[in-house]
Image (spheres, rainbow, N blue to C red):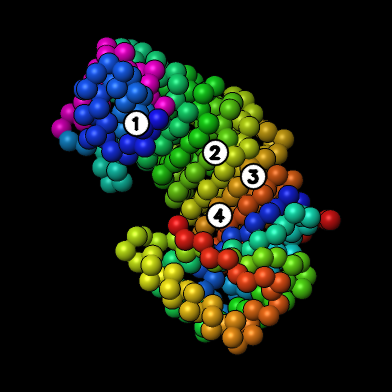
């Protein structure tokens, strides 16, 4: 219980874990709760994937609950299908307790052919996903989200129109499942109404109870209507003047 | 919106350049609320926004109009970093004292709440 208060103090947690076996048992789940894969430096992809094999060998994989994958705009993307050989893919697919993914600059377009190989093992445990500037089309994004049956929370920051040829035509993307989507939706500079149109069609509606919509004007009318029965807290920004162009009206 | 309890609004104060447009947006969203449990409208403040409170006469007129349609409790949520929190709280409290003395909050049944995060 005391260790839980130290969740942000990694230095102290590390010291605790070296004290004795019972302290190690208390500190280890907190120390290894979040795995951050950062693609920076020479041989970056090899370094990150070697980290996976080390975690696997030390038996720490089951302790990881959150994976953060960092890539940086303007730099070569390192989290791409061709860096995964069979061994690294096997290590990556052993993370069976992950409930949160935070993905920065993920090239969804190039991951989509064979996407199950990289992300299907998260499908039943994942509850929350965050994207920072995903590289994809609106439909590819909804397709990716449909992979996670128990997904409740979505946080998306920044999207820009994908101008490269798609690896699979959008019309051939058949959703995997109907994610629950009953938690929180946070959008910042997100203007792809099509993503929600697809999800609403596939899931038969959305059931978010909290929404924070910032600079996402074109999505607001659609989302408010889709969540009219479930939404308990709404956060909006007065800068979203686009909303004024066409807002939904409630029949009641 | 049939289950809404809380509406939070960002950038409502010191939002220069938008004129009445900011109020139009909020009033449009507000008009879609059909929830019997709606109870609170929260104005989210960041940075030095609390300092502009005494100048926001038009905003309080808008709030009064909205409150007639659907009564609510008013709250101010200040989101900021530690060093400025104390000062912001003090500026916000003084601003509220000022607008209360001016009668701009007479439409409320209870004094506004202040949240600090």
Tag 1's secondary structure? helix
Chain letter of the residue beneath label 2 in the structure image: A
Q: Check disc 3 and report the residue beneath it.
A: A209
Looking at the image, is mark 1 or mark 4 earlier in the sequence? 1
From the image, state whether disc 1 or disc 4 is nearer to you: 1
Tell me, yes or no, whether the highlighted magenta stretch contains residue A51: yes
Q: Does residue B76 show up?
A: yes
Chain letter of the residue beneath label 1 in the structure image: A
**Range drawn in magenta:** A42-65
Quadrant the C terminus of chain A occupies: bottom right
Q: Are marks 1 and 4 on the same chain?
A: yes
Q: CA distance from mark 1 to mark 3?
A: 32 Å
Chain letter of the residue beneath label 3 in the structure image: A
From the image, state whether disc 4 or disc 3 is nearer to you: 3
From the image, state whether disc 1 or disc 2 is nearer to you: 1
Give the image location of residue A245, x and y in percent. Answer: 66, 65
Tag 4's secondary structure? strand
Task: Answer with left or right where residue A6 lies relative to residue B92.
Answer: left
Looking at the image, is mark 1 or mark 3 earlier in the sequence? 1
Looking at the image, is mark 1 or mark 2 earlier in the sequence? 1
Q: Are marks 1 and 2 on the same chain?
A: yes
Q: Residue at x 76, y 66 (%)?
A: B70
Looking at the image, is mark 2 or mark 3 earlier in the sequence? 2
Q: Determine crowd level at label 2: few under 14, some 14-19, many 20+ residues with C-alpha closer than 10 A.
A: many
Q: Which mark is residue A153?
A: 2
Q: Are marks 4 and 2 on the same chain?
A: yes
Q: Does residue A92 show up?
A: no
Q: Which mark is residue A3?
A: 1
Q: CA distance from mark 1 to mark 2?
A: 27 Å
Prevailing secondary structure class for the magenta stretch in the rendered image: helix
Q: Check disc 4 and report the residue beneath it.
A: A213
């Amino acid at each position: 219980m005391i260790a839980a208060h130290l969740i942000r103090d990694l230095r102290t947690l590390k010291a605790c874990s070296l004290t004795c076996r019972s302290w190690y048992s208390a500190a280890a789940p907190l120390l290894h709760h979040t795995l951050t894969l950062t693609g920076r430096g020479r041989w970056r992809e090899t370094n990150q994937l070697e980290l996976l094999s080390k975690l696997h060998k030390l038996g720490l994989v089951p302790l990881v609950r959150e994976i953060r994958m960092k890539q940086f705009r303007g730099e070569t993307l390192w989290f791409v299908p061709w860096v995964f050989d069979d061994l690294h893919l096997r290590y990556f697919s052993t993370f069976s307790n992950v409930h949160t993914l935070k993905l920065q600059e993920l090239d969804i377009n190039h991951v989509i052919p064979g996407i199950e190989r990289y992300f299907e093992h998260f499908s039943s445990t994942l509850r929350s996903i965050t994207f920072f500037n995903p590289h994809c089309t609106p439909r590819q994004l909804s397709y990716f989200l449909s992979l996670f049956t128990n997904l409740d929370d979505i946080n998306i920051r920044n999207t820009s129109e994908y101008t490269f040829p798609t690896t699979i035509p959008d019309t051939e993307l058949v959703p995997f499942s109907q994610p629950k989507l009953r938690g929180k939706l946070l959008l910042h500079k997100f203007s792809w109404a099509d993503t929600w149109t697809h999800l609403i069609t596939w899931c038969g509606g959305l059931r978010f109870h909290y929404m924070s919509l910032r600079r996402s004007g074109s999505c607001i009318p659609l989302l408010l209507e889709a969540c009219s029965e479930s939404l308990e807290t709404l956060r909006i920004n007065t800068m979203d003047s686009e909303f004024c162009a066409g807002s939904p009206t409630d029949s009641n | 919106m049939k289950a809404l309890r809380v509406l939070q609004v960002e950038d409502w104060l010191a939002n220069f350049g938008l004129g009445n447009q900011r109020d139009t947006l909020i009033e449009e969203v507000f008009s879609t609320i059909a929830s019997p449990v709606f109870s609170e409208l929260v104005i989210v403040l960041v940075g030095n926004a609390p300092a502009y409170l005494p100048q926001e006469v038009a905003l309080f007129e808008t709030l009064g109009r909205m409150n007639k349609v659907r009564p609510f409790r008013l709250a101010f949520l200040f989101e900021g970093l530690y060093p400025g929190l104390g000062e912001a709280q003090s500026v916000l409290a003084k601003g509220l004292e000022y607008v209360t003395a001016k009668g701009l909050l007479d439409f409320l049944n209870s004094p506004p709440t202040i949240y600090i995060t």
